[in-house]
Amino acid sequence: MNTKTVMLPLLVLGLVVVGYSSGYSQALGSPKLAGKPPVIANFYAVEKVRYGDPLRVYIAAEDPDGDMLRIAVSVGQHAYGGYTTDWTYLKAGDQKSFKGYLQWNTMSSHTNILPDWMRVTVKVSVFDKTGNESNEVMMPVMFSSFGVSYPPPPAPFDQKDIRRLGYIIVNLYNPYKDTDRNRKAELFLFPQ
């Protein structure tokens, strides 16, 4: 049997299947484009924290469709790089709107000390059930052991009903102390 005789019908069949499935998904609408994305209306975190102290990342978000699902937090560290995204799933009552904080216990199991003035950037966004992502907000944070004070959060986070939404699980590395081996191990276990 001639290979051209077998390959040509298979090629045509493949094109028909791809064309049909593409047309079918367009007719139904792409689920990632369905609905409106959530919106982060307010956010706040202190700009300076003592290493080992808990950091509260305040966030208020709303979704016109009422189908928010989870919060994404990614941390980038100066002189080191990015860490794996941390996810916090929302409770059933928080799908339309929520206001609260994520708590990051900054003491790391990977290092007992961070250099003073170490900087990180905390990026936060919210995803809904269909995959729509909200606006992304960025908060710079510097670690310092000198002159750290924690003022009360501004409105709308200055009320007594502010609750913890979850925890941020990111263990920082000391970028100036034996990080090559640790970084390779982290990238192997949690590829980005």
Image: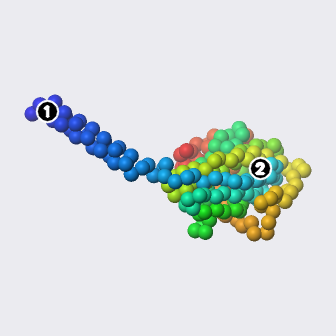
Position of 185 compared to 56: left or right? Answer: left
Q: Which mark is residue 63?
A: none
Residue 100 place in picture, x, y as percent: 71, 62
Position of 161 compared to 23: left or right? Answer: right
Secondary structure category for the residue under label 1: helix
In the image, which is nearer the foreground, mark 1 or mark 2?
Answer: 1
Residue at 55% from the left image edge and 44% from the top image edge? 192
In primary-sequence order, the first of circles 1 and 2 is: 1
Residue at 27% from the left image edge and 43% from the top image edge? 17
Graded by Cα atoms within 10 Å as few (under 14), some (14 to 19) or many (20 or more), the crowding at tag 1 reads: few
Nearer to us in this view, 187 or 157: 157
Residue 107 makes an appearance in the image: no
**What's the residue type where badge 2 is placed?**
Ile
**What's the residue type where badge 1 is placed?**
Thr
Residue at far left of view: 1
Position of 26 compared to 88: left or right? Answer: left
Mark 1 touches mark 2? (CB < 8 Å) = no
Residue at far right of view: 147
Secondary structure category for the residue under label 2: loop
Residue 160 place in picture, x, y as percent: 79, 69
Graded by Cα atoms within 10 Å as few (under 14), some (14 to 19) or many (20 or more), the crowding at tag 2 reads: some
Residue 83 place in picture, x, y as percent: 63, 47
Q: Which mark is residue 113?
A: 2
Residue that mark 1 sits on:
5
Image quarter in which the N terminus is found: top left
Q: Is residue 4 above or below residue 39?
A: above
